[in-house]
Image: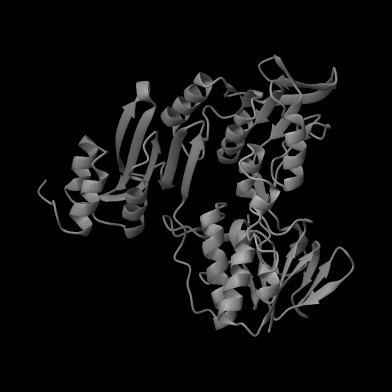
Amino acid sequence: MHHVIIGAGPAGVIAAETLHRLQGDSKVTVVGDEPEPPYSRMAIPYLLNDKIQEPGTYLRKDADHYAEQNTEVVRDRVTSIDTKDRVISLAGGGSLNYGKLLIATGSHPVSPPIPGIDSAGVHACWTLDDARAIMNLAKPGANVVLMGAGFIGCIILEALASRGVNLTVVEMENRMVPRMLDETAGTLLKQWCESKGVSVHTSTRVTGIEAAGGGLSVSLDKGNTLDAALVIAATGVAPNTQFLDGSGIEVDHGILVDSHLQTNVAHVYAAGDVAQGRDFSTGEFSVQAIQPTAADHGRIAATNMAGDNVLEHPGSVNMNVLDTLGLVSSSFGMWMGVDGGDSATLTDRDNFRYLNLRFDGDVLVGASSLGLTQHVGVIRGLIQSRTALGKWRDKLREDPTRLMEAYLANTQTIGANA
């Protein structure tokens, strides 16, 4: 059997290793469209802040790793898939036949329709090539404008600040990380960043970028302009599905898959940021562009490729943990709550501490926090186990920090009368 994996990120690499472990006599080919060895995009911020060198971003550090796994890494771009004859076509002119196929192509940055967005000095922060350009321009004291204060934007923010640049963040929503934190927490995070010397403009849009004085001039919808040596666009991503036209593989926002991560076409699977997989909390299928989901998808899809759909994917718990200039924020599950649900909140603005728990009846279904890290594992465990908290729901409403007690009382039947 020849297994072909399109995509050399975490989902693809873990899938290749799983296939080798389960079906060692099969050949595996991983196709990646970048010149470097398979690497982690999540490691790029560590490269920007000089904690690692480029080889530190590689998913596997041993140069012989893939050969020893009977895996060939092909550096080329897939242009089309013929699912009838099981052939993929490559931009370099070649083609590959497959027995089973995994599509793990991830996503790509989406550029907003802003005049000048393609100007020299404007970069995404998505590839190692982007990182090289950013490091060349983000010198100490340089004016840098970061468009977007979402999850990816805040990771980049941390790395840029460590380089000693004069950083300005522009976010069109009314708070930072709006898809992870509510208004109270997102506003506190903004205040924290400002206390660390970062200028943050929320409810603000960039309306134009143009060359000026050897650098860039960034126009805002408030009427003012910002001078910049570098502009970084972190304004969202979209799944890489453009090469699937004519393949017969169904695509919604991402590639539609079933509980086995198989597409509507036999012998074709999808995993990671490109797959529209099951959400644990809602039971619906959606794209969850986080690395833990990519890893789970890669392992499960490969197991099913090797063993005729023996595993079901139970759904990913939406989980984000972010360190922004030393302040840790997190969100889990249905952090925004459910219709008719209840909540418990702790707010300590002076110390940048915030905790919000969301309940459906007496079951914890979501949470978000700022400045509190000790209960991260407990929160995830309670959500994923769908533990009925009983009277502990009311105790948590009085004091949300008693999560560990609630967990122990309801999972180990101790402390129930505390």
User: What percent of the width, then of the height, locates residue 47?
Assistant: 65, 42
- The extreme right residue here reads 93
Q: What residue is at 44 percent from the left and 36 percent from the top? A: 328
Closer-to-camera residue (88/114): 88
Residue 321 visible here: yes
Q: In which quarter of the image is residue 184?
A: top left
Q: What residue is at 70 percent from the left and 64 percent from the top? A: 63
In this rendering, is residue 118 above or below 361?
above
- Quadrant (top left/top right/bottom left/bottom right) for the N terminus: bottom right
Residue 171 visible here: no
- The extreme left residue here reads 417
User: What percent of the width, then of the height, locates residue 281?
Assistant: 41, 55
In this rendering, is residue 195 above or below 19?
above
In this rendering, is residue 133 above or below 275?
above
Total count of labels: 0
| Left or right position of 282 against 403 | right
User: What percent of the width, then of the height, locates residue 127?
Assistant: 72, 47
In this rendering, is residue 359 above or below 278?
above
| Left or right position of 361 against 103 | left
Q: What residue is at 57 percent from the left and 78 percent from the top? A: 21
Closer-to-camera residue (243/327): 327
Which color scheme is applied?
one colour
| Left or right position of 83 against 410 | right
User: What percent of the width, then of the height, locates residue 56?
Assistant: 64, 51
